[in-house]
Image (cartoon, helix red, strand yellow):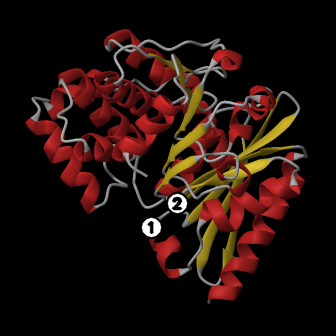
Amino acid sequence: MSLKEIIQIIKEQKASFVLLLCHRSADADAICSAYGLQGLLKRFLSDVVIEIGCPQGINKPSKTLLEQMPISVNLKPNIESAEVIIFLDMNTIEQLDEVADTIKKSSAPKIIIDHHAPNSDTTQICKLCMIDDKAAANCELIYRLFDEAEVRPNLNEAKALFVGIAFDTRHFALANSPTFEIIAKLVVEGIDAQETLAQFALPIETSERVAKLKACKRAKIVKVEGWIIALSHVSAFQAQAAKSLVDIGAHVSAVAGKKDEKVEVSLRSIRQFNEKAGVHLGLDIAAPLGEYLQGVGGGHAMAAGVSGKGEIQETLKQCLALLKQKINKTE
């Protein structure tokens, strides 16, 4: 997929309103990639209204981002009026909960730009797909569009793409060679990397610290073929808790919690587990677990999430079964 193809679809539609949609609790990578794409498209489509929509809200770091960057998002976008819809940083529209039904009914051409393992239900409704699950952040894909168009991002756009990549790679811990190449090019645009990282750093709240400690205290440790699996549950901050369990020694972790009658699971692993055990958390664990829970699951090789119907302990039991099955097949 190229920028020319995106522009062609917009022009063929004679669209006056293009909606860039971000997933629920939109993070910095989603919002910053939308902001970058918005600026790039406006260079070629100055008469088109291009809006960033976050119908299921944004997360706390993103609120800080919006306070310090000239980024505008609409928390109640008019999806019915959109003449072209572009999904950013989400591999399934089910991440938009009840809004997903409105999107399915929309006759507007749909485009997806994403760095997660593809979901066939979503790609089938899209006219154009730009998906690379080897990219460390969605902002990388947007930078590629700038590069292809031979357009240099302005300072705010470069900073946004830098911040999006920094957040999604855990301050570059999950970055790969192409990621660092892009970061180097963004720094050339005038970004002070150290200052920018400090500007958007957030102190850890007491509630997050408590959640991480509870997850450690409640963790069930299981060894499978030499791999250490940690399973736990907390009422909030599941993703942060899952990362903490891996940071302190687990090869792979799954932390579950319940919210609004839905069970949610965050999965994390170290690179060694992905490469040597051959387990892709998004494809091999989250996707089938999502089906089991009559919900949705997906993500990256070393970070994934699940949401559906069920009970916490049964969900973790099924998650462990899937991990055991996949490990035994690859050992």
295 over 61 or under it: above or below: below
Q: Name the image quarter holding residue 53.
A: top right
Which residue in the structure is indicated by mark 2?
Answer: 302
- The answer to whether 256 appears left or right of 118 in the picture is right
Q: Position of residue 140 (x, y in %)?
A: 34, 46
- Check disc 1 and give the amino acid type: Arg
Q: CA distance from mark 2 to mark 1?
A: 7 Å
Dots 2 and 1: beta carbons under 8 Å? yes
Q: Position of residue 319 (x, y in %)?
A: 77, 62
Using the image as rendered, state which of residue 79 and residue 136 is in the foreground.
79
Residue 300 visible from this viewpoint: yes
Q: Position of residue 91 (x, y in %)?
A: 61, 47
**For the point 91% across and 46% down, which residue is it?**
310
- The answer to whether 53 appears left or right of 122 in the picture is left
234 over 121 or under it: above or below: above
Number of residues whose C-alpha sits closer than 10 Å to that of mark 2, classed few (under 14), some (14–19) or many (20 or more)? many
**For the point 65% across and 51% down, which residue is it?**
123
Quadrant holding the C terminus: bottom right
- Check disc 2 and give the amino acid type: Met
Using the image as rendered, state which of residue 110 and residue 192 is in the foreground.
110
- The answer to whether 145 appears left or right of 226 in the picture is left
Element carrying mark 1: helix
Q: Name the image quarter holding residue 257.
A: top right
**For the point 89% across and 43% down, which residue is it?**
309
Element carrying mark 2: loop
Q: Position of residue 44 (x, y in %)?
A: 31, 26
**For the point 18% across and 38% down, which residue is it?**
186
Residue 266 visible from this viewpoint: no
99 over 161 or under it: above or below: above
Which residue in the structure is indicated by mark 1?
Answer: 271
Which residue sits furthest bottom? 331
